[in-house]
Amino acid sequence: MYHIVKRGETLAVIAANYRRSLQQILAANPGITIPSLIYPGQRIVIPGLPDPATIPYSISVSLGRKRLTLFRSDKLIKSYPVGIGKMLTQTPVGEFVVVNREPDPGGPYGSMWLSLSKIGYGIHGTNNPGSIGKAVSKGCIRMHNHDVLELARQVPNGTRVTITR
């Protein structure tokens, strides 16, 4: 897949966001000879992730409605209630992709963790089901454990995730 460089991003940040090493990013982008000389609008190859346009699934998260909606070929499949970030640790808005996953990550992350292409953020289960439908997280999107497992069974890595207010 490709990442379009945004203002203020560094290659190290881009690598971390996609859980790739700087060496992997540089190897996939032989035209980048000086890592500090990237620019906004530049297209960076992210190795090991499919192009989101080739994946029929997409995820939309409405922070205002506290809902995650799964689509297949732009057709609504299912909508799930979610917990979101609280006032001081808000869930980021924007376009992301699922970059990897970890079953049974332990602790407050419930039965599944789906990493988003923003370091430290993901869609995950919870050990506190009463938090679903509330703004109480540190910025992640919380789901009931059975819901996140159902979602993870359907969406591959590379699936586009759009988060809106």
Image: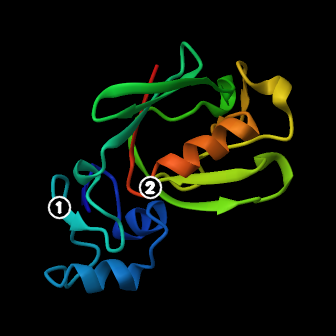
Residue at (56, 50) in percent of width and height:
153
The 10 Å Cα crowd at callout 1, few under 14, some 14 to 19, many 20 or more, is some
Q: Of the residues shown, which amino acid type is indicated by label 1?
A: Arg
Q: Say whether residue 19 is left or right of residue 40.
A: right
Pick the residue in front: 64 or 8: 64
From the viewer's perspective, is the residue at label 1 or at label 2 nearer?
A: 2
Q: Position of residue 138 (x, y in %)?
A: 70, 38
Q: Quadrant of residue 141?
A: top right
Residue at (38, 56) in percent of width and height:
158
Q: Say whether residue 97 is left or right of residue 108.
A: left
> Quick check: 67 above or below 126?
above
Residue at (38, 31) in percent of width and height:
71
> Quick check: 108 above or below 77?
below
Q: Earlier in the sequence, mark 1 or mark 2?
A: 1
Q: Secondary structure at mark 1?
A: strand
Q: Quadrant of residue 148?
A: top right
Q: Position of residue 60 (x, y in %)?
A: 43, 29
Given the current orientation, which residue lies at the most extreme top position?
Answer: 65
Q: Is residue 85 visible?
A: no
Q: Position of residue 38 (x, y in %)?
A: 21, 67
Residue at (78, 47) in percent of width and height:
110
Q: Of the residues shown, which amino acid type is indicated by label 2?
A: Pro
Q: State the separation of the CA atoms marked 1 and 2.
A: 23 Å
Q: Exactly how many numbered labels are in the figure?
A: 2
Pick the residue in front: 151 or 127: 151
The 10 Å Cα crowd at callout 2, few under 14, some 14 to 19, many 20 or more, is many
Q: Say whether residue 57 is left or right of residue 118.
A: left
> Quick check: 73 above or below 133?
below
Q: Position of residue 13 (x, y in %)?
A: 43, 63
User: For mark 2, what is the residue?
Assistant: 156
Q: Quadrant of the N terminus?
A: bottom left
User: For mark 1, what is the residue?
Assistant: 43
